[in-house]
Image (tube, grey):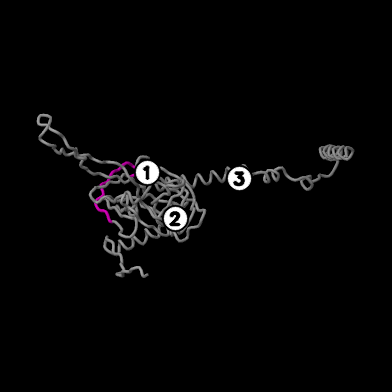
Amino acid sequence: MKKLISLIALLIIIIAIGQSYNLLPKINLEKYFPKINSISKTNTSKTGDKQIVVYEESIITKVVEESLPSVVTVGIMKTTQGQSYLQIDPFNPFGGFTQIPGKKQKIDQNIGSGFIVSKDGFIITNKHVVADEQATYKVLTNDKKEFNVEKIYRDPLNDLAILKVNANNLKALSLSDSSKLKLGQMTIAVGTPLGEFTNTVTTGIVSGLGRGITAGSPFEGFVEKLDNVIQTSAPISPGNSGGPLLNSSGQVIGINTAIAQEGSNIGFAIPSNVIKDLLENFAKSGNSFERPYVGVRYKMVD
């Protein structure tokens, strides 16, 4: 074996010397020895992984950059009466108790999210975000502009609401066809979790389709059954409600609505096709909602 290696080495030296002095005809060594770059092509797993990561990051950053001007924070403004209390007159301890009204308190805080669906000031959010009919609401845009909500149209059947603000030339998000969603697709959630951290972005995938859930809490007086919702692994927190769930093209595939308290990274969104139906019904009805009801009653039969 050593003799064979020595013979090959000697042959290569002779050929090189011969070609340098034009003593031998030129031999195409590439015919017998593969190019170096062919070896590098078979060893690109790490570089390939980096390219995939960079490509995914570029998609997310582009979607976020284009969608943030269309995402808003929803805030509530309300004056509440503090709890009254009983007080004894120190100069007349036997005169009974006097009821003292509590101090009025002003509430002004961010509570949810929403997104713009028309350039003339229509915004979608969840109905439970603007459930208090005695309060007034405002929206804060990405560029720190604040608008008072002039009208609220609450859908009687779904956890959806349309807000109207006095604004023009707003940037609206487009709605995708949620019937074409597939498991494993990228999802990007944008909103204001905990009513504090505006423009928060989280990512995940479509974890499930066609889910049926019961959202809300009987202790809070708000319970609603939602069917055919999207499950996503993108982390969602209270305050994200009403914000958009986007695909890799920057289109809305759903509206972030609820989370599973018992687990982590289990969020739910109402599909974009439901929002489309809502907006179509709203436009056809002259900026109002007309929902059909079936006048049927039933009772249990033993």
The crowd level at tag 2 (other Cα within 10 Å; few <14, some 14-19, many 20+) is many
Amino acid identity at mark 3 = Gly
Rendered location of residue 59, percent (x, y): 49, 47
Q: Quadrant of residue 178?
A: bottom left
How far apart in space, not on screen, are marks 1 and 3 (Cα)?
35 Å
Rendered location of residue 242, percent (x, y): 36, 50
Please indicate whether residue 117 sits to the left or right of residue 12 in the image.
Answer: left
Which marked residue is nearer to the observer: mark 1 or mark 3?
Answer: 1
Circle number at residue 192: 1
Residue 149 part of the magenta-drawn span:
yes
- Residue corresponding to mark 3: 48
For image coordinates 26% across by 47% down, the residue present is 137
Q: Mark 2 falls on what kind of element? A: strand
Circle number at residue 247: none
Amino acid identity at mark 2 = Ile
Region rendered in magenta: 141-153
Which marked residue is nearer to the observer: mark 1 or mark 2?
Answer: 2
Mark found first going from the N terminus, 1 or 2: 1
Q: Quadrant of residue 106?
A: top left
User: Majority secondary structure of the magenta segment?
Assistant: strand
Most foreground residue, 286 or 129: 129
Residue 102 part of the magenta-drawn span:
no
- Residue corresponding to mark 2: 230
Q: For the C terminus, give its image quadrant.
A: bottom left
Q: Mark 3 falls on what kind of element? A: helix
For image coordinates 30% across by 46% down, the residue present is 139
